[in-house]
Image: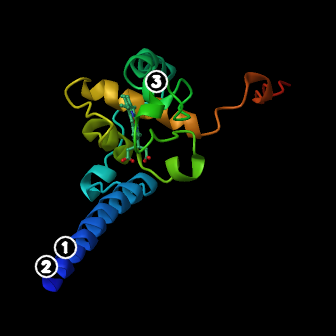
Amino acid sequence: MTAPAKRQKTLQKILFALVILLIFLSIGLAALHKTPWKVPTEDKLRKNPLAASDANFNAAKPVYNEYCANCHGDAGKGDGSDAMMYDPAPSNLTEPKHMNSLTDGEIYYQITQGRKPMPSFRKKLTDDQRWQLVILVRSFASPTTPPPALIKTPEPPARK
Ligand code: HEC
């Protein structure tokens, strides 16, 4: 082999190694880096049209168990039976700092749009089901209402 041909071969090898390195680097970065969701302001500001009532909360439960728990886990910790298969991993919906920074509209948007590997639920669930899920998802990270024993019932006004 002539000297220039040899040099070209070496150069090709280096380039090939660089390309491989770049591919691995970007895969690695994508796995490590959970980028924030970009939610349009209009969607962010949207209010939940449904009341955070027991009825809406209870309606969301079977829907969550069927469509979400396999990834996010029964209690929203991101530890569902399929969670290991996904990259990025399903979010921990009990993480208060992050979850409480989201508006209802943002959570609704996330459920509606999805983001790989999370599917979109725009067509699989009705608007009401998705808003009900927002109420349920909120409950994972928010301290629940204190147990009844701790709620002080106001003393009936003293009669004279
Ligand atoms: C296939 C697994 C999978 C299913 C099913 C799934 N999710 Fe997710 N979910 C994910 C993953 C993965 C992310 C993180 C996506 C990202 O950050 O790019 C996520 C993110 C979210 C977020 C955003 C939280 C944050 O980090 O800001 C919410 C809210 C959410 N999911 C709710 C739900 C609800 C409610 C359902 C059921 C209707 C559901 N998900 C079904 C995998 C799933």
Q: Residue at x 43, y 15 (%)?
A: 62
Amino acid on which disc 2 is placed: Ala
Q: Residue furthest front?
A: 1
**Ligand 1 image-quadrant field:** top left
Q: Residue at x 25, y 69 (%)?
A: 13
Amino acid on which disc 3 is placed: Ala
Percent across and percent down for residue 87 are 40, 42
Amino acid on which disc 1 is placed: Lys
Percent across and percent down for residue 66 are 39, 17
- Closer to us: mark 1 or mark 3? 1
Question: Quick one: label 1, few (<14), some, or many (20+) residues within 10 Å?
Answer: few
- Residue at numbered disc 3: 69
- In this image, 7 relative to 104: left or right? left
Q: Nearer the viewer, residue 90 or 6?
A: 6
Q: Quadrant of the N terminus?
A: bottom left
- In this image, 1 relative to 42: left or right? left
Q: Quadrant of the C terminus?
A: top right
- Above-or-below relation of 148 to 113: above
Q: Residue furthest bottom?
A: 3
- Residue at numbered disc 2: 5
Question: Which label's residue is closer to the chain start, 3 or 2?
Answer: 2
Element type at mark 2: helix
- Residue at numbered disc 1: 9
Q: Nearer the viewer, residue 4 or 42?
A: 4
